[in-house]
Amino acid sequence: MKLIFLIIFSISLTGSSIAHNHFPITTESKIMIERGKLAYQNNCASCHMVNLSGAEDWKGVDEDGHRKAPPLNGTGHTWHHDDKTLHAIIKYGLARLVNNYEGKMIGFDDKLSDKEIDSVLAYIKSFWSEENYEYQLKLN
Ligand code: HEC
């Protein structure tokens, strides 16, 4: 787990070179959340589950030693990352962002536009407690 925090930390730093000006992403637009829900169900639910709870026993690894899909509903640590980092993880996948990291989540840059990725993030944030949501907003 320590390694993954280190990895995510280094993405937060390099992520700043990825230009994007739609941050912070809020939960103010119901339409955005609805769009995000659709995109989530079509692209993410297979691993992160329909209710965003992540894979069972997500802190362990799967049979070939890869990380399992973490929860996105606020019970994991997704809300510890700023929008730029989260957007980059969804767009490129950790495996492409981090040297020598073999992740199973493939980036969605060929399937989802930046706007759609933002909508999915709005949908994800709609599951977080008010406290986590406000905390994460300030990171941006
Ligand atoms: C094939 C399974 C799979 C699919 C499909 C998938 N993910 Fe993931 N996701 C993972 C795994 C595994 C990780 C852990 C990092 C890694 O190993 O790449 C992860 C990590 C993440 C993270 C970082 C979470 C954290 O707390 O650090 C976010 C955010 C995320 N996924 C969002 C999404 C979204 C949004 C979609 C759909 C657009 C999606 N994922 C589709 C498997 C998947």
Image (cartoon, rainbow, N blue to C red):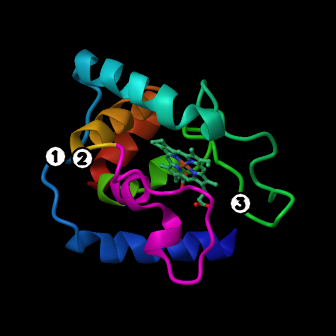
Q: Which image quarter: residue 38?
A: top left
**Amino acid of disc 3:** Arg
Residue 121 visible in the shown view: yes
**Amino acid of disc 1:** His
Question: Mark 2 — residue?
Answer: 114
Q: Residues within 10 Å of mark 2 (few under 14, many from 20)?
A: some
Answer whether residue 72 is magenta in the image: no
**Residue at the location (51% across, 83% down)?**
99
Question: Mark 3 — residue?
Answer: 67
Closer to the chain start, of discs 1 and 2, is: 1
Instruction: Look at the numbered disc 2 and give the secondary structure of its residue.
Output: helix
Between marks 2 and 3, how big is the CA–CA gap? 25 Å
Closer to the chain start, of discs 2 and 3, is: 3
Between marks 1 and 2, how big is the CA–CA gap? 9 Å
Residue 8: percent from the left, percent from the top? Answer: 49, 69
Quadrant of the snapshot with the C terminus: bottom left
Disc 3 within 8 angstroms of ligand 1 (CB): yes
Residue 22 circle label: 1
Q: Nearer the viewer, residue 36 or 28?
A: 36
Residue 63: percent from the left, percent from the top? Answer: 87, 59
Residue 73 visible in the shown view: no
Answer whether residue 96 is magenta in the image: yes
Between marks 1 and 3, how big is the CA–CA gap? 29 Å
Instruction: Look at the numbered disc 3 and give the secondary structure of its residue.
Output: loop
Indicate which label's residue lies in the foreground, 1 or 2: 2
Indicate which label's residue lies in the foreground, 1 or 3: 3
Magenta stretch, main secondary structure class: loop
